[in-house]
Image (cartoon, rainbow, N blue to C red):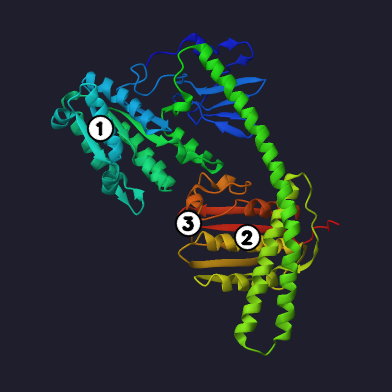
């Protein structure tokens, strides 16, 4: 690869802009402004490009990194050995044109080509190469052009939902070795990782990227992976996007980050990005204000009819004592559901108040945490017959000075999440213990889908949901963030422990002697 020029290394200066390069290990990269992040194209593991309107640009790169404005097929950007690029794309046409250049130049240079893609992409690429004068059937017969179906090849080495390293090395290694016969260089394009990603199997996709990197240590090839940018839409995908970028030595943007040949074009593109980001920030702030107003107004309007429903259900339950058990149970069910809806409405109201900058005022009273846990488990069990919800109370009563309604809401949220993210049923364990004289501990453990390791540090952020949860279950991403706020207002802590595919445990610690917050 051509060396980096002094201008690129030292950071060219322009009016209003400053490139500041520092050297770090290879990580992910992007463009961030305010609460928004847009990822940009560059070569080899840049740490991050931070753009702040009116201030300048900071680019942190690894020591072997330089900016790239050339597509992966460009002669200036392709190396024959140990090269692992990722090409993001928004349209199939853009992807196929990039691959047309990548493989066209390689075939002209005498390289072999291996294409692992969907049927439509394989047919489209072959058609374009034939238009450029390549004899695809002849190259295929000579072993220089290998076209394989994504799903077929995945079935060879996937075991229990994850790629098996030995089977992968055996299958892919043989394909690459055959293509590299007679000392030929090999260019590979693959969509197996993006197929797994689109299926919601992000952990398997990252593992497959790691196996490709291991393969590159032993086989001389140039590899490009393709991902549709639509697969990374949404804030919950930011961590996963960074993981994908980190597994590649070069990252190429989708067509909206099009190739720019001059410095003026690049500066203009940066200025436009800053303007668009500033607009997005303003629009997001206005949308948040409108949403907060709606949450507060809606919660207020819903409280009255819910109170009426709850009141009539309780009155009818008293008046029908001793009558048909089905009537009594039905009224209790109405009461339980009304209480849950009331808790949800209160959560909406609290979320609106917090975003508006208002503090949530706790209404503390003497509460028996053990009794509250038993009651909550009993209600949740009746609504979740597929699950076995166990409650383990080591010591009762366990009295503390807490806001009973909000602590109850935290319990309902944690147990409800355990049920939701254990879609196949199974056992959920709720445990209440005392540590010393001053602290009560509540834990909720399930054996469900678990939380990906990359998502775990952010699981308590507002509106953030794990990558494996977005496609699998519905949710708002509000519950855990509000749970943390409630517990921290009590002077306590809430933590999560999880292994993806094996379940999660949430642990709440509440001080029993905290002074009232009147």
- The mark nearer the N terminus, 1 or 3, is 1
| Local crowd size for mark 1, using a 10 Å CA cut-off: few (<14), some (14–19), many (≥20) | many
Q: Quadrant of the rendered structure where residue 268 is?
A: top right
Q: Is residue 265 left or right of residue 494?
A: left
Q: Position of residue 448 (x, y in %)?
A: 48, 60
Q: Which mark is residue 449?
A: 3
Q: Quadrant of the rendered structure where residue 270 is?
A: top right
Q: Which mark is residue 114?
A: 1
**Up-down: is 352 above or below 88?**
below
Measured Cα–Cα span from mark 1 to mark 3: 35 Å
**Residue at 29% across, 42% down:** 150
Q: Which residue is mark 2?
A: 413
Q: Position of residue 337 (x, y in %)?
A: 64, 69
**Residue at 57% across, 16% down:** 19
- The mark nearer the N terminus, 2 or 3, is 2
**Mark 2: which secondary structure?**
helix
Q: Is residue 97 left or right of residue 245?
A: left
Q: Nearer the viewer, mark 1 or mark 3?
A: 1
């Amino acid at each position: 690869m051509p060396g980096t020029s002094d201008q690129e290394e030292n950071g060219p200066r322009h009016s209003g802009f400053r490139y500041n390069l520092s050297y770090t290990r290879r990580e992910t990269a992007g463009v961030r402004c305010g609460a928004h992040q847009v990822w940009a194209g560059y070569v080899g593991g840049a740490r991050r490009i931070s753009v702040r309107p009116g201030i300048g640009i900071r680019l942190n790169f690894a020591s072997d990194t330089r900016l790239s404005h050339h597509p992966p097929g460009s002669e200036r950007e392709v190396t024959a050995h140990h090269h692992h690029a990722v090409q993001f794309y928004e349209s199939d046409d853009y992807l196929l044109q990039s691959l047309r250049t990548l493989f066209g130049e390689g075939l002209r240079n005498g390289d072999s080509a291996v294409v692992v893609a969907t049927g439509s992409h394989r047919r489209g690429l072959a058609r374009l190469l034939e238009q450029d004068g390549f004899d695809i059937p002849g190259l295929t017969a000579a072993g220089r052009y290998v076209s394989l179906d994504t799903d077929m090849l995945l079935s060879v080495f996937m075991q229990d939902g994850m790629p098996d390293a030995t089977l992968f090395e055996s299958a892919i290694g043989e394909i690459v070795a055959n293509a590299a016969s007679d000392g030929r260089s090999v260019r590979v394009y693959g969509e197996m990782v993006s197929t797994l990603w689109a299926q919601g199997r992000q952990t398997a996709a990252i593992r497959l990227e790691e196996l490709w990197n291991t393969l590159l240590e032993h086989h001389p090839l140039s590899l490009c992976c393709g991902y549709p940018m639509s697969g990374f839409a949404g804030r919950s995908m930011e961590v996963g996007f960074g993981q994908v970028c980190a597994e590649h030595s070069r990252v190429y943007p989708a067509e909206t980050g099009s190739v720019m040949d001059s410095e003026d074009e690049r500066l203009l593109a940066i200025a436009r990005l800053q303007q668009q980001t500033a607009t997005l920030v303003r629009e997001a702030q206005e949308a948040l204000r409108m949403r907060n107003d709606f949450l507060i107004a809606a919660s207020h309007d819903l409280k009255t009819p819910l109170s009426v429903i709850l009141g009539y259900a309780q009155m009818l339950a008293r008046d029908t004592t001793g009558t048909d058990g089905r009537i009594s149970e039905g009224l209790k069910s109405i009461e339980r559901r009304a209480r849950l809806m009331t808790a949800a409405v209160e959560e909406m109201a609290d979320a609106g108040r917090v975003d508006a900058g208002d503090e949530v005022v706790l209404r503390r009273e003497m509460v028996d945490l053990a009794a509250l846990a038993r009651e909550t488990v009993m209600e949740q069990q009746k609504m979740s017959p597929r699950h076995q919800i166990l409650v383990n109370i080591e010591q009762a009563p366990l009295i503390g000075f807490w806001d009973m309604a909000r602590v109850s809401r935290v319990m309902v949220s944690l147990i409800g999440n355990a049920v939701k993210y254990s879609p196949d049923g199974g056992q959920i364990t709720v445990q209440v213990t005392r540590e010393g004289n001053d602290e009560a501990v509540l834990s909720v453990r399930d054996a469900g889908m678990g939380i990906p390791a990359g998502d775990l540090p952010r699981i308590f952020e507002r509106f953030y949901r794990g990558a494996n949860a977005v496609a699998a279950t519905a949710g708002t991403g509000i519950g855990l963030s509000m749970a943390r706020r409630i517990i921290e207002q009590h002077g306590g802590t809430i933590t999560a422990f999880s292994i993806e595919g094996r379940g999660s445990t949430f642990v709440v610690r509440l001080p029993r002697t905290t002074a009232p917050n009147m």
